Image: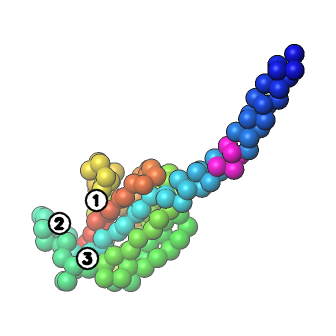
């Protein structure tokens, strides 16, 4: 009988210790996963809308990179420097919004892809609101080539 009580107490103690470890370690693991988030990077260029090859004619860091262009992701506004701007929001559904049509551009064309899998997330005009939306996952890196056409 004493052996059964001792075994029961030992199992209950082990269960409480395991529960304590789970309570302490699980939130830390979840916070670590959330802190990794996803990366969203924009390569922003200006280009004549008369070209038939946006990437070939316009993806030129020296001559076409657009400085000072404003974009917002997850409530954070940032500006391009050397045609480049980046965020690390949490994973999930995101809208990338530009604020640059007042500079004399009549349209923007956007191509976004997942750099891990190669999947295309967006390929087309950004529309009248100068915005595109897509869903990201933890650890995903998305690069969008954003061409402002004049």
Residue beneath the point at 25% across and 76% down: 46
Q: Which residue is mark 3?
A: 46
Distance CA(mark 2)–CA(mark 1): 10 Å
Question: Which of the 4 image quadrants contains residue 55?
Answer: bottom left
Residue 22 covered by magenta stretch: yes
Let me know if residue 36 appears in the view: yes
Residue beneath the point at 60% across and 55% down: 31
Let me know if residue 127 appears in the view: no
Residue 45 covered by magenta stretch: no
Q: Position of residue 121 (x, y in %)?
A: 34, 51
First-in-chain label (3 vs 2): 3
Label 2 neighbour load within 10 Å: few <14, some 14-19, many 20+: some
Q: Nearer the viewer, residue 128 or 56?
A: 56
Q: Nearer the viewer, residue 101 or 2?
A: 2
11 relative position to 34: left or right: right
Label 3 neighbour load within 10 Å: few <14, some 14-19, many 20+: many
Residue mark closest to the camera, 1 vs 3: 1
First-in-chain label (1 vs 3): 3
Instruction: Indicate the secondary structure of the residue bearing disc 1.
Output: strand
Distance CA(mark 3)–CA(mark 2): 11 Å
Residue beneath the point at 55% across and 56% down: 32
Label 1 neighbour load within 10 Å: few <14, some 14-19, many 20+: many
Instruction: Quadrant for the C terminus, please.
Output: bottom left
Disc ID at residue 111: 1
Q: Is residue 122 above or below residue 97?
A: above
Q: Which residue is mark 2?
A: 55
**Span colored in magenta:** 21-25
């Amino acid at each position: 009988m004493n052996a059964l009580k001792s075994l029961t107490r030992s199992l209950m103690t082990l269960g409480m210790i395991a529960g304590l470890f789970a309570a302490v370690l699980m939130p830390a693991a979840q916070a670590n996963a959330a802190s990794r988030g996803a990366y969203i990077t924009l390569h922003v260029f200006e280009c004549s809308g008369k070209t038939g090859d946006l990437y070939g004619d316009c993806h030129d860091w020296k001559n076409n990179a657009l400085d000072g262009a404003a974009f917002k992701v997850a409530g954070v506004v940032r500006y391009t420097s050397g045609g480049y701007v980046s965020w690390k929001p949490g994973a999930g559904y995101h809208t990338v919004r530009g604020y640059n049509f007042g500079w004399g551009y009549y349209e923007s064309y956007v191509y976004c892809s997942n750099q891990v899998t190669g999947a295309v997330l967006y390929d087309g005009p950004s529309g009248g609101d100068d915005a595109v939306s897509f869903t990201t996952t933890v650890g995903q890196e998305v690069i969008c080539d954003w061409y402002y056409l004049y």
